[in-house]
Image (cartoon, helix red, strand yellow):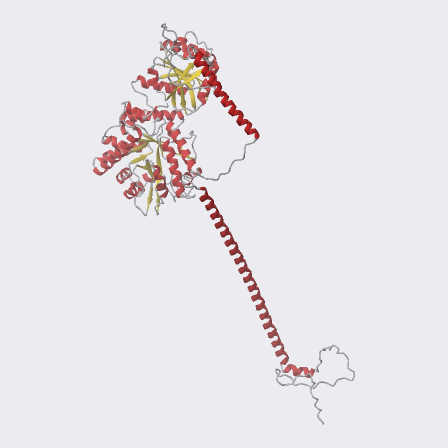
Amino acid sequence: MDEPRKQPPPSNIPTETNPLQEPAPQPPPPAPPNPQPPQPKLIRPQSFAPEQKRTYLDRGEVRTMEKDSVRIREEEARKEQQRITELKAHRETEKERTAVERIRASALATKQQEETQKREDLKKIQDSILPPGEERRIRNLPSPPSKGKKIFVRLIVVIFFAFIALNLVLFTAWYFFFRNQAVSFEFPQIPFISQFLPQSEPPPAPSPQPTPSPAPTPPPQAPTNAIRNAINPVHTTTLQFATASDLSALLAQFLQAEQQPDFTQLRFRKTADNELVANGAEFFSIFGIDLPETTTPHFAGDSFFFSYSYARGNRFGMIIETPSPNEAKATLEQWTPQMEQTISPTLSFWAPQKTTAYTKAWRSSAQGGVEIRFQTFSLQDYGIVYALFDNYVIFASSFEATRAAIEALQSASQGSIRPTTFAALQDSNTFKPPPSLSFEQALGQILMIGIEDATLTQELQDTMRRLSPGGVLLLSKNIQNIEQLKQLTYDLQRIALEYSSLPLFIAVDQEGGAISRIEFGKEKTAQSTIEDIEQAYKVGELRAEELKFLGINLNLSPVLDSTKPSDFLFERTFQAGRLQTGQLARALLQGQKESGILSTLKHFPGYGGIAFNPEKKLAAVQEFPDISPFVFALPAKPEFLLLSNVIYANLDPDRPFPFSPKGITLGRSDLNFQGIILSDDLSQPSLLDNYSFEFIVTSPVKAGVTMIMFSKEPYAQKAYQTLLDLAQQDPFLKRSIEDSAKKILQLKKEFFFTSKPAVPLEHLSQQ
């Protein structure tokens, strides 16, 4: 059987030659006889026989070519993507470079412009400064005046010269015709031209008659020296008036004006005859008031008119010498029911306010054994008040003024003066600071004690006599109202002077805000709300004035602890940085000192970092606090430095700071503080629960603390006896007590007994 004849493979089937070898060139086909324009050649898929497909696929060439083609396309795509990325990056770089160049150019231009402006400003300043002795040659000439101004100026000039000419004519006429004739002119009286006249009397007019004339009647003299010396007024004021309405208006204005605390003597001069009002009866008659016939003699004696200034304002009153105190008492009792109606023409200045406290009922009280009768018009201490002491009738619009007058007269009757300052007290030779102290007196001086009562009880007098403490700490339980507090501080000072011849440091925690022991005080700004130095100074100034008026001479403030919001003392501190805290404290201290009280920095070195109350639980911290606020405040020279009852482990891990000689030495050396170092309260449970009482009492004194504080009176008495017993056996303890007492005595001499005292003790003059 013949084999089938092999056919050559189609021309479009690749041979097994090298696929990368270029195909051999083929001869071009012969041109057609009639050439036609080339037509687009349609590429149609070739069809293969199944056997051809199989052969082709078996060789794998199609798959290989597809893979190569895909790889080539991917490589080209990757290169294209890389090129695009590089192009974008280049464009971004160009943009950034352009922006940077633009910013640099703008900054350079701005800098050049600023430098140019600075040079111009400097040139202007230099041009404006002339060498010494020279003046600017060129000035801006003012615009020429308007026509109206020219006319006005000319008119003024004409009037001026006409006035001069008229005076020349008058002078010439007087010189040649009238100078030998007596000419007098009487000018109308204008009562409100001057309210306050000089004290000297006007000289009498010379008599034109050569014949002798009777001597003029001398004007009424001032009230008897006994009353004036007893009252010791801080000022004397004369009011001149023409009518009753003038006097009423003048007194109302005067009593509303600000005055110095204490008594001011008032004198009333009538413009009609230039005479002084002689007595109370004449004073009431000016207002058309007819006193009862039986009462008039008791208002006709020597009289002292006064204004009394205290926290509630100024109040009017008079003190009259009566010929018969018993008769005066009886007549005043008879007049009492009609007294308000009788003096009603004076109520515009006597008692301008009537509130719900007004009552027609009369009540009685007592001051130093003297009965005071009063009718209340207002809670602001307005009313009708009278009392009799010795041979004097006190008649006033204020209970407080009447009580102060009684006190002054009592002091005078006992043969002592009533000083307004300790300088006056020293000059009176009534009290002098002792040249030295016994050991018992020295021991009492290093104690700052708390008391249990709000009045001078017999128990308190016994404590003061036995301890003779150097200071008293007043807490809220000791403070009720203005009158009570002033009486308490006065009594404490009187007892202290009587038993030791040394005044007391009377201290209080009046920080402002939550810690304001005197709740009725007006100045209670919290430290945390003080924003600047001016406000701090004003707060200190006003606060000191209030405390001084109440008889308190030592404020345990300001607080300088560096705290965080989580600390228990945070709300009591300045909300500022350390430097600003020191500056605010210094301003507040200056305000207090210039207003006349002693001041304290506390609690050195600080209660910062303690979230609980260290009075109840003993506090111990590792790091010693930053004391820079104390350093910044010390230039104000506070007299006291109060310590914190805290253990600082990196200073002295075994002792609270007041018990540590290292701590006290640090305060003296690092701060260079030479004043009174005062412990915080040593009767706190945090100390009593952890140490023996003997250790609590003796350790601070031996460490160098000048003054130790016990806020509870029983612990103060126990501390005194403990130190008294132990000092007999411990020479070092005894010497430490004596050294501390010397430092305290020196401060008291400087503060209370100097010729120019740092503070008047107002409690001796404001009761």
Q: Is residue 678 above or below residue 8?
A: above
* Residue 681, quarter of picture: top left
Provide residue 351's location: percent of width, then percent of height.
46, 18
Considering every residue shown, the one lying at the far bottom of the view is 1
Considering every residue shown, the one lying at the far top of the view is 211
Provide residue 67's location: percent of width, then percent of height.
61, 76
Provide residue 313's location: percent of width, then percent of height.
43, 23
Q: Nearer the viewer, residue 367 or 381?
A: 381
Provide residue 431's location: percent of width, then percent of height.
27, 24
Considering every residue shown, the one lying at the far right of the view is 34
Can the viewer see residue 651 in this picture?
Answer: yes
* Residue 518, quarter of picture: top left
Can the viewer see residue 456 in this picture?
Answer: no
Residue at image coords 32%, 21%: 418
230 left or right, relative to 145 = left
Q: Is residue 244 above or below residue 548?
A: above
* Residue 552, quarter of picture: top left
Query: If the image is split into quadrants, where does the N terminus sit?
Result: bottom right
636 left or right, relative to 720 = right
Query: If the image is split into quadrants, where does the C terminus sit?
Result: top left
465 left or right, relative to 609 = left
Q: Nearer the viewer, residue 40 or 163?
A: 163
The count of marks equals 0
